[in-house]
Image (cartoon, rainbow, N blue to C red):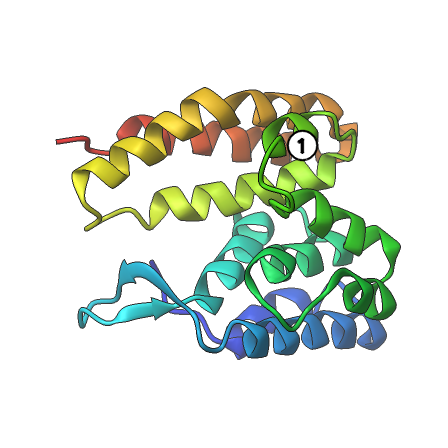
Amino acid sequence: MSIENRESFFQRLYPFFPPKVLRDIELAYILAKAAHRSQSRKELDEHGVPVRYFEHVRRAALIGIDLARIVRPDTVIASILHDAIEDTRDLRPEMIEHVFGSDVCGIVKVLSKDPKEGYLDRFYACTDWRAYFVKACDRLDNLQSLTGSPVEFRRRQVAETRDKYFRLFDRMVILTPEEHRDGTRRLRDRVVDTTSAIALD
C-alpha cells in the first residue's frame, strides 16, 4: 500500500470543491484523526509496528475517490467518519449531525454496529446507496490489509465477506443512481476479486 499523508489526500480533492466544502472535509479529517489517536490496527507496517487506526479510515475514503472515482462531499466525509460512532467515545451522532448535517450522520449511523444484534438485516433494509458504498470501501480496505494476518483470521474474513457482504454490495449497485453505477460496480467487483485472491493456507 502506498504511503499517504494529509497533503496527498487533499491534493486529490482541491480540483473538485470550493473552499467551504474543503474546510468541511478537512474538519472531518482532523476530528477523526483525533478521535482515533489512541487506536491501532491488527496489521503491521514494514517495520513490524501496528498501523495506527486512522490509516484505515483514510484509505477507505481513498478507495472511494481513486477506485470508484466517486468524489462527493457526503461520501468522503462519511468514509472518514465511518467508525467514529462505533469505535470512539468522542464523536457522538449528535456532534456529527451538528457539524456535518443529518445526511452524513444518517450514513454513519447505518454503518455503526449499535446495537450489534441485527446489524446486517438492519443494513439490508437501508435504501441509501451511499451507506453501502462506504461499507464496500471499508470492507475492501480490510481485505487488502490481511497480508501477514494469521490464516484462521483470513479465513474468517473471507467467509464473512462471501456469506454476509456480497449480497449487500449487489444491492449497492442496484440502488446506486445511474451516474455513479459504474463506480459502485467497479468497487463491488474489486471486493469479489480481492476476496477470491486471498491465500487461505
On screen, residue 195 versus residue 190, left or right, reads: left
Q: Position of residue 186 (x, y in %)?
A: 54, 32
Question: Hey, what amino acid is under mark 1?
Answer: Phe
Question: Which corner quadrant holds the N terminus?
Answer: bottom left
Quadrant for residue 29, please give it: bottom right
Crowd rating for badge 1 (residues with CA inside 10 Å; few <14, some 14–19, many 20+): some
Q: Where is residue 8 in the image (x, y as percent from the top left)?
A: 52, 73
Question: Which corner quadrant holds the C terminus?
Answer: top left
Q: Which of 163 and 72 is in front in this view?
A: 163
Q: Position of residue 88 (x, y in %)?
A: 58, 66
Query: What's the residue at 31%, 33% (across, down)?
Result: 156
According to the image, label 1 marks what residue?
123
Q: Nearer the viewer, residue 145 or 187?
A: 145
Query: What's the residue at 54%, 78% (across, down)?
Result: 7
Vertical placement of residue 150 versus 168, above or below: below
- Mark 1 secondary-structure assignment: helix
